[in-house]
Image: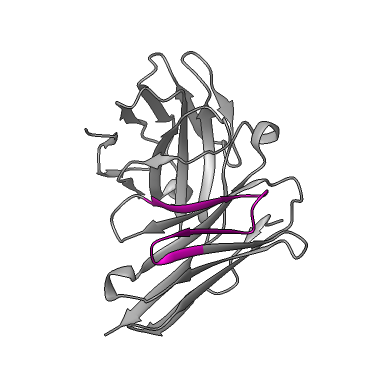
């Protein structure tokens, strides 16, 4: 059982380039999330989705776009990468809230923008 | 304005002793709290959780205590083992108000010395 899989694991971009990070989950979870982790900042929510075809902004959405065309996939796009977007990106998924919100995380994508 | 605070960036403990990691929150609407553990180059993994209707939850060597009046929770690890060395994140949720989204603290790096 793969759980939550992120691709790629590492990427170096030049300022202004675009890219898409892919997240796939095989647990039939409704909710999916994209977080970024920066030193001393913990995990901050970028965008999330409560179901196929829906997306919503999180705490730090600027500079990112997302799509949830299929229930199992959640894509994070950077249209014009900036050095401030250098970070480790984590995707997560969870069941709808019925009393708990345990989320399962992928292994992360380390992105460097030069 | 940080809603979930982990004021100790690091903690060092001797193997076999107790590790106590602390977390404070400001939002009285939070009703579910979780602890995640993160090793380097891996995604966070769920450790233990507690609902606001309880004041204690225990799972093996891990116990979480919740003091709602003080808006404080703590994670106790007894006995501590070298394999427990990791970054621990406290997270909170207010359920429907945030669509189940988790708000994370900045993390505490635990080092357990043999």
Q: Nearer the viewer, residue A90 or B30?
A: B30
Check the image and name the residue furthest to the left.
Answer: A1
Q: Residue at x 29, y 34 (%)?
A: A3
Question: x, y percentage for residue B36?
Answer: 44, 55
Location of residue B80 by image quarter:
bottom left
| Residue B50 to residue B7: above or below | above
Reply yes or no: does residue B29 show up in magenta.
no
Location of residue B47 by image quarter:
bottom left
In the rendered picture of this protein, how many numbered marks are placed on residues? Answer: 0
| Residue A99 to residue A12: above or below | above
Magenta stretch: helix, strand or loop mostly: strand
Question: x, y percentage for residue B103?
Answer: 59, 48
* Residue A40 seen in render: no
Question: x, y percentage for residue A33?
Answer: 47, 34
Q: Residue at x 51, y 75 (%)?
A: B20
* Residue B25 seen in render: yes
Question: x, y percentage for residue B113?
Answer: 31, 84
The quarter of the picture where the N terminus of chain A appears is top left
Q: Is residue B40 left or right of residue B68?
A: left
Q: Residue at x 72, y 56 (%)?
A: B1
Q: Nearer the viewer, residue A46 or B53?
A: B53
User: What range of the chain is rendered magenta?
Assistant: B44-63
Q: Nearer the viewer, residue B84 or B43?
A: B84
Q: Residue at x 52, y 38 (%)?
A: A101
Reply yes or no: does residue B45 show up in magenta.
yes
| Residue B53 to residue B5: above or below | above
Location of residue A76 by image quarter:
top left
């Amino acid at each position: 059982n793969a759980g939550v899989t992120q691709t790629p694991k590492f990427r170096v971009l030049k300022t202004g380039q675009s890219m898409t990070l892919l997240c796939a989950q095989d647990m039939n979870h409704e909710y999916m999330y994209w977080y970024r982790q920066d030193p001393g900042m913990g995990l901050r929510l970028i965008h999330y989705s409560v179901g196929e075809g829906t997306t919503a902004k999180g705490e730090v959405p600027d500079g990112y776009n997302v799509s949830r065309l299929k229930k199992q996939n959640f894509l994070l796009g950077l249209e014009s990468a900036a050095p401030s977007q250098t970070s480790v990106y984590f995707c997560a998924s969870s069941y709808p809230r019925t009393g708990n919100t345990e989320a399962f995380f992928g292994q992360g994508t380390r992105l460097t923008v030069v | 304005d940080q809603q979930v605070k982990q004021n100790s960036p690091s903690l060092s403990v001797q193997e076999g002793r107790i590790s106590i990691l602390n977390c404070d929150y400001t939002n009285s609407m939070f009703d579910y709290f979780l602890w995640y553990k993160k090793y380097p180059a891996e995604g966070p993994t769920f450790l233990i959780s507690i609902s606001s209707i309880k004041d204690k939850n225990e799972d093996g060597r891990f116990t979480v205590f919740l003091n709602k009046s003080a808006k404080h929770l703590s994670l106790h690890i007894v006995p501590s083992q070298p394999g427990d060395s990791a970054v621990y994140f406290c997270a909170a949720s207010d359920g429907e108000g945030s669509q189940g989204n988790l708000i994370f603290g900045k993390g505490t790096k635990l080092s357990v010395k043999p």
